[in-house]
């Protein structure tokens, strides 16, 4: 059983008033601050790229700089509708820094040394602080009256792209295999351009680094500790119970097939049909609502079906358990299912792509489930599809949802 915590989204909000994600960060990060050395050490533990060489990190670095340029292009093209420009630039700069740090680590280069040499001349090139333990991004990012404007950012990002392009070209030509110092020189130039781009966008690199780590540990936590449930403080008759068993089965009436769902021998919800020309068995999709409730502690749909709406708090009842929240959840389930159809129902895979998780995160912004980490969504999706595939194969059976231990399982059987 995974450990529980007493934290709750009701008392953890960001400046916009929306709940922050429940993310456990390494203890080295104190009050949201960390040195460049600490950042490289922590980022090293989050390297999940399959190849231990340099190629993927260099390509990743090149791709993130491309994303910065793409965001700037969108601003010019869609200025009236691209309202998340600042947040996007902040995130992409954090991602760029992660790939840069990972490249340095894989090349056995010290990031604080690179960072300091980026702002030194020949006369003091080797005069770096011993062990670099206290050097922070703020120490290297003095604005010095540098302009903060779209034009200056465009120039600096193009410079950064040129540096990374040169690095990629020399890597492909095999230069670094013959001269490691050549790679170090490229890294120094690239870091200098990265800091200049951050300055021109008025982005605090320390904040961008922290944001990147929060996103990374939201997806790949050091330990999977579930936050306290959203209904933990509610009366017993308004909380999900410790566990429930559901019977889900395909039935036939004449030439029409439909799915029924029972809980405690009582049919809940409507009979579900395909409602689509192509046969895709979506009528078994209620297992996704069960998986959401198990791993996220969230399912307005299931609360409505089981009469567990939190009516003791009128605001929560209306805004978190009401009709609009139900529509949001159904929309998420439909979106996830559509992606699953493209990926063979996620069979024989152990994770989902980040773009899917990010899209879901955007979709549920403003609702309590935004508090949940990306790894919780991934577990819900993977377990939901696992149960779905078994139901499609057997056409009927029992689904045990253990809300206390955060597990969901399938057992073949008939209700007859």
Image (cartoon, rainbow, N blue to C red):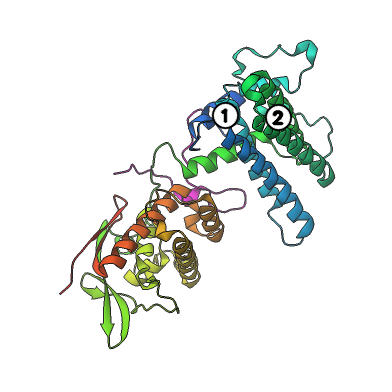
Quadrant where the image shows the C terminus? bottom left
- The residue drawn where x is 40% and y is 47% is 227
Task: Kindly report the secondary structure that dominates the magenta region of the rendered protein.
Answer: loop
- Where does the image place residue 106, in percent across and percent down from the top left? 55, 27
Q: Earlier in the sequence, mark 2 or mark 1?
A: 1
- The residue drawn where x is 73% and y is 47% is 69
Q: Residues within 10 Å of mark 2 (few under 14, many from 20)?
A: many
Query: Does 224 appear in magenta?
Result: no
Please give the residue where the numbered disc 1 appears in the rendered image: 39
Q: Please give the count of numbered marks on the rendered protein.
A: 2
For residue 14, above or below residue 359 = above
- Position of 68 with respect to 328 (left or right) is right
- Where does the image place residue 127, in percent across and percent down from the top left? 71, 11
| Separation (CA) of disc 2 from disc 1 | 15 Å
Task: For residue 70, say whether it is visible.
Answer: yes
Q: Which residues are magenta?
A: 1-28
Task: For residue 79, say whether it is visible.
Answer: no
Quadrant where the image shows the N terminus? top left
| Label 2 SS | helix
Q: Residue furthest bottom?
A: 254
Nearest to the observer: residue 110 or residue 233: 110
Please give the residue where the numbered disc 2 appears in the rendered image: 191
For residue 160, above or below residue 306 = above
- Position of 407 with respect to 373 (left or right) is left
- Where does the image place residue 235, in percent across and percent down from the top left? 33, 60
| Label 1 SS | helix
């Amino acid at each position: 059983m995974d450990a529980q915590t007493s934290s709750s989204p009701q008392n953890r909000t960001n400046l916009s008033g929306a709940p922050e994600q429940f993310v456990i960060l390494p203890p080295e990060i104190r009050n949201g601050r960390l040195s460049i050395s600490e950042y490289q050490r922590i980022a090293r533990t989050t390297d999940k790229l399959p190849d231990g060489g340099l190629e993927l990190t260099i390509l990743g670095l090149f791709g993130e700089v491309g994303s910065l340029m793409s965001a700037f292009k969108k601003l010019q093209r869609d200025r009236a509708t691209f309202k998340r420009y600042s947040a996007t630039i902040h995130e992409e700069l954090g991602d760029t820094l992660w790939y840069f740090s990972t490249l340095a680590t894989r090349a056995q280069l010290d990031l604080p040394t690179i960072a300091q040499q980026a702002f030194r001349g020949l006369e003091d090139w080797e005069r770096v602080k011993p062990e670099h333990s206290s050097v922070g991004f703020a120490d290297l990012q003095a604005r010095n009256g540098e302009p903060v404007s779209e034009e200056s950012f465009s120039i600096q990002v193009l410079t950064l792209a040129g540096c990374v392009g040169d690095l990629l070209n020399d890597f492909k030509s095999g230069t670094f295999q013959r001269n490691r110092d050549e790679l170090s020189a490229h890294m120094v130039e690239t870091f200098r351009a990265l800091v200049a781009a951050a300055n021109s966008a008025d982005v605090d690199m320390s904040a961008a680094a922290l944001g990147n780590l929060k996103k990374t540990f939201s997806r790949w936590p050091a330990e999977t500790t579930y936050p306290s449930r959203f209904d933990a403080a509610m009366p017993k008759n308004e909380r999900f119970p410790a566990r429930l068993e559901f019977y889900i089965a395909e039935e036939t009436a004449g030439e029409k097939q439909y799915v029924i769902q029972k809980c405690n021998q009582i049919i809940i919800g409507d009979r579900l049909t395909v409602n689509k020309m192509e046969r895709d068995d979506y009528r078994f999709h209620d297992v996704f609502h069960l998986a959401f409730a198990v791993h996220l502690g969230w399912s307005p749909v299931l609360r409505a079906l089981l009469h567990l709406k939190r009516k003791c708090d009128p605001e929560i009842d209306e805004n978190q358990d009401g009709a609009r929240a139900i529509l949001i959840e159904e929309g998420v389930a439909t979106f996830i299912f559509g992606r699953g159809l493209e990926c063979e129902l996620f069979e024989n895979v152990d994770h989902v792509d980040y773009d899917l998780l990010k899209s879901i995160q955007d979709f549920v912004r403003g609702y309590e489930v935004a508090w949940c980490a990306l790894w919780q969504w991934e577990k819900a999706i993977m377990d939901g599809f696992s149960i779905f595939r078994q139901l499609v194969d057997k056409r009927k059976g029992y689904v045990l949802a253990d809300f206390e231990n955060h597990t969901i399982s399938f057992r073949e059987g008939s209700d007859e």
